[in-house]
Image (cartoon, rainbow, N blue to C red):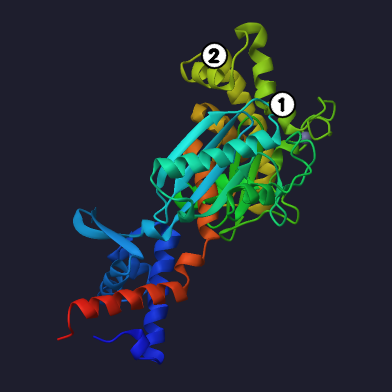
Amino acid sequence: MTTDRSTPGSQASLREANRARIVDAVKRFGGLTQIELAETTGLSTATISTIVKELTGAGVVDTRPTSRSGRRALKVTLARQLGLVAGVQFGHRHLKVALGDFGRTIVAEQQMPLPLDHRVDTGLDRAALLVVDLLERVGASMDELLTIGVALPAPVDTSTGMISVRGVMRGWDDLHIGQTMSKRLARPVIVDNDANLGALAEHELGAGRGHQDMVFVRASYSTGAGILLSGHLHRGYAGTAGEIGHVQVDPMGDICRCGNRGCLDTVVSSTALLDLVRSSHGDLTLRDLITRATEGDPGCRRVIADAGDRIGAVVAQVVNTLNPQVVVVGGELAAAGEILVGPLREAVLRHTPPNTIAPVEVVLGELGPQAEVMGALTLALQSTEVATDHQTISTLTDESMAGRSRRTPAP
Ligand SMILES: [Zn+2]
């Protein structure tokens, strides 16, 4: 049996390129059967089968039995030994941390409450501690952690990891969040806006799959949107694209956290919605409001439906500007399902010109409250190239083939 090392030339580089194509496809889609790999890469099933055997032997991919259209098949995923990535989501009131592998599986996760307007160093300390705790819990060492993706409820300048609009997260304004977190964990940290990351996750793994132009609306304690154009996140020059929470809907309205007047957020943020039911229902949390609405409480249903209508009118302007195929609705408020999405959809359709070719779809997200942390994991995976670059695969495979040929003499 020969190895690439002993047969330099075009045959070897072709095999190396084919291996890289297969690994790239598995990385991109998380896990594929060999038939799906053949369809995705355009390689023959025989080539796929040979290379997958090599990559399995080299510890680059794992295979496990599955069924596809009722037939038995082998599902190919990237091997755990390639390392783990962490996703961190800072909410207004909570912190969520997850560890994921290259098969896009969450291997461990934990959530903890955070005090409202918590101090930035407290938040970052707790996040770093949770990452270390989770690594210990799955029996992984710090060496196995490759990259950390962080989701913030604020527009982020991804080139610096700093928040690009002052006042949205009090106390976090002047900090290079990526650099600071990176120092605590000694790993690369990439920071992005939570709606962008929700959009990324729904596009890769959820309701936005197969759609190149998509808007993800994150209706939560505050409101934002993540925009995908031609399959790529559109963040804008300073990261403020999709800040629909700060579109003015009432020129005489309340002053917003951002300093402007009558922003959408002053009307549909959790604070605004809970204020509406205080005299009738007392002090509720956002979760209480959603639970009561889904149980049929007419006042709570009305508050969420009206919020859907107000958000939909603003989303319609985005739809008019960008002409997406689909609007995916997520965020905490989306737990109310059609109570929110129904009026939001009606408002989008009412405020956009009838499109007979391809009317925009407005659908509920499929990933629920996991969307943002899964997006943070996806971003971390996408920016981790070390273990799957051509050189590493080639080296791993060559070593394994050399080892195998030592153990079993070539015929
Ligand atoms: Zn505002």
In the drawing, does residue 252 fall left or right of residue 401?
right
Which residue in the structure is indicated by mark 2? 298
Residue 383 screen position, x and y as percent: 55, 60
User: Gap in Å between the C-alphas at discs 2 and 1?
Assistant: 19 Å
Neighbor class of circle 1 (other Cα within 10 Å; few <14, some 14-19, many 20+) is many
In the drawing, does residue 306 fall left or right of residue 58?
right
Which element type, helix, strand or loop, lies under badge 1? helix
Q: Amino acid at mark 2?
A: Pro
In the drawing, does residue 294 fall left or right of residue 249?
left
- The one of 142 and 14 positioned closer to us in this rendering: 142
- The one of 314 and 123 positioned closer to us in this rendering: 123
Which residue in the structure is indicated by mark 1? 267
Residue at image position (64%, 47%) is 181
Badge 2 or badge 1: first in the primary sequence: 1
Residue at image position (56%, 18%) is 289
> Which circle, 2 or 1, is nearer the viewer?
1
Residue 89 screen position, x and y as percent: 57, 40
